[in-house]
């Protein structure tokens, strides 16, 4: 079953729409009415989207939602998603795939901040760039993403994988400042460059195939190691805490 | 004039020897009266347990430390959020809710009076500001004196009358209700990162021991003729083997007051630990309860721990640092110059953690082993042992051995060898629960004469009507009914107004602040004492003139004036 | 002539409460004990006589009632109103602001999000080992100023609370206290330091990390130089910290508003945590606006969060970076703006100010500011500490009653906001 949701034109398109109801499980079984929020106004979902349903689904895995049009200010799509598929043809707003536990979200454009925040499982693929806090945690919470996979084909902003506690984040482009900061567990792979990777990490593994700028001075150089096709320098750290994390880096430069 | 008649309730009012009678209660203008006219509003309480409004005599709901607990915990805030609805404001938070959150949730449980357990006098204005936004309860606060320099100096000089003068000044200035000691001496030592290990350690510089502080304060407290006794958080909280320190403390407590205890010992669960380390940690509730049973001059509250997430917060700075070293979670500390300290860390009490399970059992053991419910008050030291919304579960555990056994089966099995709980058959009855949740508090706080904790003529019309039909409920087996019934009243009435109806609260704005103003002879009035003023000017970072809490911070207030016997 | 003692200065987070004012002919003519900036505030500027409203690009005078009605209508009409400012007013007004925001479903934020917001985010991750300023005054034998310049920003901080203040446990405070200053440039404050640590811009996190590692006994991995600081100096600083009796770290925007932002602060906090295993150590953010900390306190007990609270959905939602004023304005995510007691027009990035110009913007402030130039309406009010009174919280959490010295015809923020709130409630009941 396909649900095609095309974003309608609206007044003040920058005012964000919160649409956590757009998640495959809500489209299983008989048709229901849903509401989204534009600021403090509760709107019928059909005021914001033109919706077309093809077929019928009695299990979540049969549902595919396709989002079309300018969805760059639509927030919280795929929140608590537990199966099925969402394809976003353009860009997507903040908090896409929050708390997701299963299923697939594919974003053909770019994603705004907090993509896959506190994710537990499933997969997010983003073909463009992603802004800050990919696969991060929430304010004050010690553990962020705990499972699943996020793959970004482009670049990401700052604090990717902050407080990462499980699962895997793969960034094909560059990452901004402080990826993997406060990381506890899980896998973070950056194929491009970044700065100040993994400050205060207490566990997990981060690999940077490009250059780490402003490399932090509190990681211990453990020598080189063959990792797949690359020879990388292995670091343990961060030694400002227990130092049980591992960094594999191609190139690094300290700020001395 | 507003009149109300509550008809046919099943009333328990221990202070007036009403042990479960079907009767009517008449209310006029916020007070309980003999009778009302025909035009009175009627509440049909048929088949419902009707009690005086609940009182929490030791909770942390307002002030600098509590607010810091909120400030540092957005993750706790998102765990309990409600929207604005009708008269009710939005609320946030689970273990440290917003002031409205506290007020509404206490109100739906039938609580109408709350005592904030710890207020640093220098930050008292903050506590009083938050009281204004706790609209459905009368509030009061303990003023902290554990590390007060001027008090320590008077004790060091053996001048208890001067100590009384110092207490009187600070109580008045902070609009406080009672004298609180938190780890006496320890918080001053913590100013340089140290602590005291037992009540006989002398603290550096001031050269006084916790024992001298405690006994001196009790003596001075009684000289001031205050409604409440000294309110003590013993030294060594949370350390294995600390029960000896607690017993030692209890053995030094004189019996100085005929009407009430001379010492209120708070969250005693945290002070009833045997063993030498966490490896041989065990319950010493029996020893503590035996001591309390022999000492009418002591009243305790249990400081029950319940499983789940919560936030610990206390003026006991060094203890919180120890907890931080144990849990490695976030840690906040806030020392207050010349006065006291405080610390906060979030915790998770787990059933499968042996230490946590033993703690849980100790709280219950204390409540079951102390013979008189007048001497053992039900409290969780909210939110330290658990958020207060768990009180109905605690009540059910105390009323039902069956429930206790069912819960016991879910904890770490090694608990059995460390505690005596499974062997205790006692089940509290309705009246004992009524005592341990309101009447004993009113008596211990000295507020019976001010209309709290009972339903006699002239009392405040603070009434909780629970949807529990006592005639058809067997608390020893129907523990779900107990939990649900005590969680949400049908009616909570505060000063004659229905403030919560099946959990929906309405605006009241009749909340009042209770505070004390002891009058002392001129030669003990610190306002004119050169040494006192000199210390103030030199060492405080605030001017003495700006220190006292102004009247406008206690908009509606009941000032209890006492005449000191010096 | 009239003298009033023990007045509280409504300028910076120090909230000095020993100011002596001299009043003549309903004017403050002198403010003794005050620093120069506080003095300037007491001695005042030209104030608006009445509300002004912009009609067809031209300012006109209007009445208070009309101004209040305009504000109520504008805010009720908006889908996502933003209520920003609050640091320059008293707590009682902030409380009403929260109630109003909750009622209309807007976003409320204080200037925190552009000063010590990162400090709060860090505290929410790792906590805050702090104390009152008198505790530092009486006990501290080591003072660190990191990324702040109290000589300029908080002129009396050193004389009242730290370097020059007499303390109970110190015989000769000035001699016994060691001072460390850490900054990217040699500030005036650096001039009085026993140890000045010059860090390359953006290098604070690395320097803090290096200190943490040294204190944990892992100094061997530290390179010869970290962000411009030699290992030798780092070891010396670490030793000073470990061996003092009571250390106090103060930090400012030089740590919060640079690369890494709140992660710098959480690292600094964990450094202080670590030091507490060796001695006594505390940390205090140097809060700027006199009552910015009060806004955090009030927001927290009323909403659960210290700043940047979004009530659009009825429940409080908090996520600085998303719900903070600067981000909302830059992304054009609000459609009306109320500014109370602050001047975003002077401090916000251009994109933010541009958006304020595009949407209805209302200012409640005693003085004309740069924000006035992008606003549609300004309502002048009394100045707390001069002709209005109320509660404020010092940078260390100490609540003070800020008193008024004069009576005037200006309404206070509390009065104006109360009237607005009452009108909004009326509309809601209809």
Image: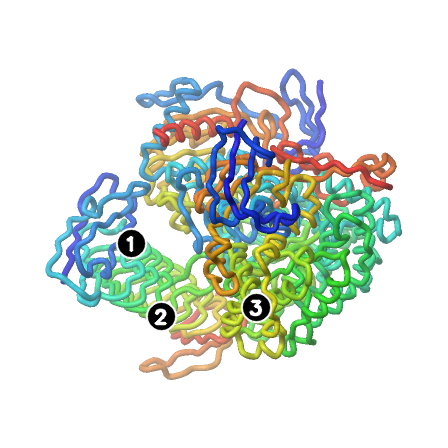
Question: Which residue is at a point 60% across and 20% down the rendered structure image?
Answer: C407
Residue bearing the label numbered 2: A147
Residue bearing the label numbered 3: B327
Residue C368 locus on image (x, y percent): 47, 27
> Which of the two labelled residues, at mark 1 and mark 2, occupies the earlier sequence position?
1
Mark 3 Cα shell of 10 Å, populated few (<14), some (14-19), many (≥20): some
Q: Separation of disc 1 and disc 2 at Cα? A: 20 Å
Residue C114 locus on image (x, y percent): 47, 45
Name the chain letter of the residue that bears numbered label 1. Answer: A
Name the chain letter of the residue that bears numbered label 2. Answer: A
Residue bearing the label numbered 1: A20
Question: Which residue is at a point 14% across and 60% down the rendered structure image?
Answer: A2
Residue A197 image-quadrant placement = bottom left
Q: How is colour applied across the structure in the image?
A: rainbow
Q: Which mark is residue B223?
A: none
Mark 1 Cα shell of 10 Å, populated few (<14), some (14-19), many (≥20): many
Left or right: residue B358 versus residue C263 is: right
Front position in the image: B97 or B249: B249
Q: Separation of disc 2 and disc 3 at Cα? A: 24 Å
Most extreme residue toward the left is A54
Residue C45 image-quadrant placement = top right
The quadrant the N terminus of chain C occupies is top right
Left or right: residue C243 versus residue B332 is: right
In the rendered view, tell whether residue B187 sits above or below residue B352.
above
Q: Nearer the viewer, mark 1 or mark 2?
A: 1
Residue C313 locus on image (x, y percent): 35, 45
Residue A85 visible? The answer is: yes
Residue C11 locus on image (x, y percent): 59, 35
Q: Separation of disc 3 and disc 1 at Cα? A: 35 Å
Question: Which residue is at a point 31% across and 63% down the rendered structure image?
Answer: A100
Left or right: residue C200 versus residue B218 is: left
In the rendered view, tell whether residue A190 sits above or below residue C310.
below
């Amino acid at each position: 079953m396909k649900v095609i949701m095309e974003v309608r034109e609206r007044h003040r398109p920058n005012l964000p729409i919160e649409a956590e109801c757009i998640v495959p499980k809500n489209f299983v079984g008989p048709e229901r009415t849903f509401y989204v929020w534009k600021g403090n106004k509760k709107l019928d979902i059909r005021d914001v989207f033109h919706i077309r349903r093809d077929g019928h689904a009695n299990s979540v895995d049969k549902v595919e939602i396709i989002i079309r049009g300018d969805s760059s200010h639509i927030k919280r799509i795929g929140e608590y998603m537990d199966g099925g598929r969402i394809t976003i043809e353009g860009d997507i707003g903040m908090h896409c795939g929050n708390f997701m536990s299963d299923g697939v979200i594919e974003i053909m454009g770019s994603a705004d901040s907090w993509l896959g925040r506190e994710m537990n499982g499933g997969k997010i693929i983003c073909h463009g760039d992603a802004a800050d806090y990919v696969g991060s945690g929430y304010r004050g919470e010690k553990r962020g993403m705990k499972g699943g996979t996020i793959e970004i084909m482009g670049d990401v902003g700052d604090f990717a994988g902050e407080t990462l506690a499980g699962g895997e984040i793969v960034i094909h482009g560059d990452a901004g400042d402080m990826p993997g900061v406060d990381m506890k567990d899980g896998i973070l792979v950056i194929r491009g460059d970044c700065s100040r990777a993994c400050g205060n990490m207490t566990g997990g593994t981060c690999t940077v195939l490009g250059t780490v700028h402003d490399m932090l001075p509190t990681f211990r150089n453990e020598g080189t190691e063959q990792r797949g096709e690359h020879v990388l320098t292995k670091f343990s750290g961060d030694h400002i805490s227990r130092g049980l994390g591992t960094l594999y880096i191609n190139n690094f430069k300290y700020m001395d | 004039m507003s009149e109300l008649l509550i008809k046919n309730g099943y009333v328990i009012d221990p202070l007036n020897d009403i042990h479960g009678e079907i009767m009517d209660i008449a209310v006029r203008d916020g007070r309980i009266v003999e009778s009302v006219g025909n035009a009175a509003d009627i509440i049909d309480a048929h088949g419902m347990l009707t009690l005086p409004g609940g009182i929490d005599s030791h909770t942390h709901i307002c002030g600098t430390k509590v607010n810091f607990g909120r400030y540092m915990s957005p993750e706790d805030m998102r765990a309990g959020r409600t929207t604005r609805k009708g008269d009710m404001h939005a609320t946030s938070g689970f273990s440290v809710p917003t002031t409205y959150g506290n007020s509404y949730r206490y109100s739906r449980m039938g609580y109408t009076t709350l005592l904030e357990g710890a207020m640093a006098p220098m930050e008292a204005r903050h506590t009083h500001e938050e009281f204004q936004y706790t609209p459905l309860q009368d509030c009061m606060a303990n003023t902290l004196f554990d590390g007060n320099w001027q008090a320590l100096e008077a004790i060091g000089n053996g001048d208890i009358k001067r100590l009384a003068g110092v207490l009187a000044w600070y109580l008045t200035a902070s609009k406080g209700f009672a004298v609180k000691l938190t780890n006496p001496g320890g918080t001053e030592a913590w100013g340089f990162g140290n602590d005291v290990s037992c009540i006989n350690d002398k603290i550096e510089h001031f050269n006084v021991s916790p024992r001298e502080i405690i006994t001196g304060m009790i003596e001075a407290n009684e000289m001031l003729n205050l409604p409440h006794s000294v309110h003590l958080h013993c030294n060594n909280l949370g350390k294995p083997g600390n029960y000896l320190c607690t017993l030692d403390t209890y053995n030094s407590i004189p019996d100085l007051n005929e009407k009430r205890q001379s010492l209120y010992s708070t969250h005693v669960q945290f002070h009833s630990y045997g063993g030498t380390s966490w490896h041989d940690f065990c319950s010493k509730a029996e020893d503590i309860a035996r001591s309390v049973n022999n000492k009418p001059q002591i009243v305790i509250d249990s400081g029950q721990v319940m499983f789940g997430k919560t936030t610990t917060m206390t003026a006991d700075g060094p203890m919180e640092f120890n907890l931080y070293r144990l849990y490695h979670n976030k840690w906040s500390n806030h020392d207050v110059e010349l006065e006291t300290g405080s610390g906060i860390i979030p915790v998770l009490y787990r059933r499968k953690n042996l230490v946590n399970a033993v703690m849980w059992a100790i709280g219950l053991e204390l409540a079951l082993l102390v013979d008189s419910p007048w001497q053992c008050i039900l409290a969780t030291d909210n939110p330290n042992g658990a958020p207060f919304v768990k009180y109905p579960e605690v009540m059910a555990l105390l009323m039902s051995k069956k429930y206790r056994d069912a819960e016991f089966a879910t904890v770490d099995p090694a608990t059995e060898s460390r505690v005596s709980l499974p062997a205790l058959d006692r089940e509290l009855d309705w009246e004992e629960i009524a005592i341990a949740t309101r009447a004993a508090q009113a008596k211990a706080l000295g507020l019976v004469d001010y209309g709290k904790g009972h339903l006699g003529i002239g009392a405040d019309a603070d009434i909780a009507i629970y949807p529990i039909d006592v005639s058809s409920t067997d608390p020893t087996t129907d523990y779900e009914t107990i939990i649900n019934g005590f969680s949400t009243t049908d009616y909570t009435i505060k000063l004659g107004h229905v403030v919560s109806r099946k959990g929906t609260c309405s605006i009241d704005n009749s909340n009042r602040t209770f505070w004390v103003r002891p009058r002392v002879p001129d030669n003990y009035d610190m306002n004119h004492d050169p040494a006192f003023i000199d210390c103030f000017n030199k060492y405080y970072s605030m001017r003495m003139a700006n220190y006292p809490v102004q009247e406008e911070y206690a908009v509606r207030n009941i000032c209890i004036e006492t005449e000191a016997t010096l | 002539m009239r003298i009033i003692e023990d007045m509280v200065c409504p300028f910076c987070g120090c909230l000095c409460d020993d100011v002596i004012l001299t009043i003549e002919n309903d004017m403050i003519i002198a403010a003794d004990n005050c620093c120069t900036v506080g003095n300037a505030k007491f001695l005042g500027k030209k104030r608006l006589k009445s509300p002004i409203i912009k009609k067809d690009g031209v300012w006109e005078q209007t009445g208070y009632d009309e101004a209040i009605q305009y504000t109520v209508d504008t805010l009720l009409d908006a889908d996502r109103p933003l209520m920003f400012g609050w640091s320059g007013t008293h707590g009682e007004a902030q409380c009403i602001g929260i109630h109003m925001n909750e009622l209309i479903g807007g976003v409320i934020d204080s200037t925190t999000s552009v000063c010590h917001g990162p400090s709060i985010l860090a505290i929410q991750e790792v906590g805050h080992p702090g104390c009152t300023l008198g505790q530092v005054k009486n006990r501290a034998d080591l003072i660190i100023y990191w990324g702040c310049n109290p000589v300029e920003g908080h002129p009396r901080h050193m004389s009242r609370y730290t370097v020059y203040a007499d303390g109970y446990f110190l015989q000769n405070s000035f001699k016994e206290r060691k001072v460390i200053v850490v900054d990217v440039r040699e500030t005036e404050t650096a001039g009085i330091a026993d140890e000045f640590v010059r860090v390359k811009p953006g290098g604070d996190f690395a320097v803090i990390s290096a200190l943490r590692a040294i204190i944990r006994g892992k100094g061997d991995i530290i390179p010869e130089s970290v962000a411009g600081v030699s290992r030798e100096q780092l070891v010396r600083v670490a030793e000073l910290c470990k061996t003092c009796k009571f250390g106090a770290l103060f930090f400012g925007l030089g740590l919060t508003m640079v690369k890494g932002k709140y992660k710098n602060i959480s690292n600094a906090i964990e450094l202080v945590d670590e030091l507490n295993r060796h001695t006594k150590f505390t940390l205090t953010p140097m809060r700027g606006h006199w009552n910015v900390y009060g806004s955090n306190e009030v927001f927290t007990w009323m909403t659960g969060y210290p700043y940047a609270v979004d009530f659009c959905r009825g429940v409080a939602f908090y996520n600085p970076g998303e719900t903070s004023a600067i981000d909302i304005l830059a992304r054009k995510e609000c459609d009306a703006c109320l500014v109370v007691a602050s001047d975003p027009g002077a401090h916000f990035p251009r994109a933010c100010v541009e958006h304020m110009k595009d949407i209805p913007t209302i200012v409640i402030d005693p003085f004309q500011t740069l924000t006035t130039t992008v606003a549609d309406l300004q309502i002048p009010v009394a100045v707390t500490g001069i002709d209005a009174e109320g509660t404020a919280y010092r940078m260390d959490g100490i609540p003070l009653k800020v008193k008024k010295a004069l009576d005037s015809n200006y309404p206070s923020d509390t009065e104006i906001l109360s009237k607005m709130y009452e009108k909004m409630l009326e509309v809601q009941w209809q």
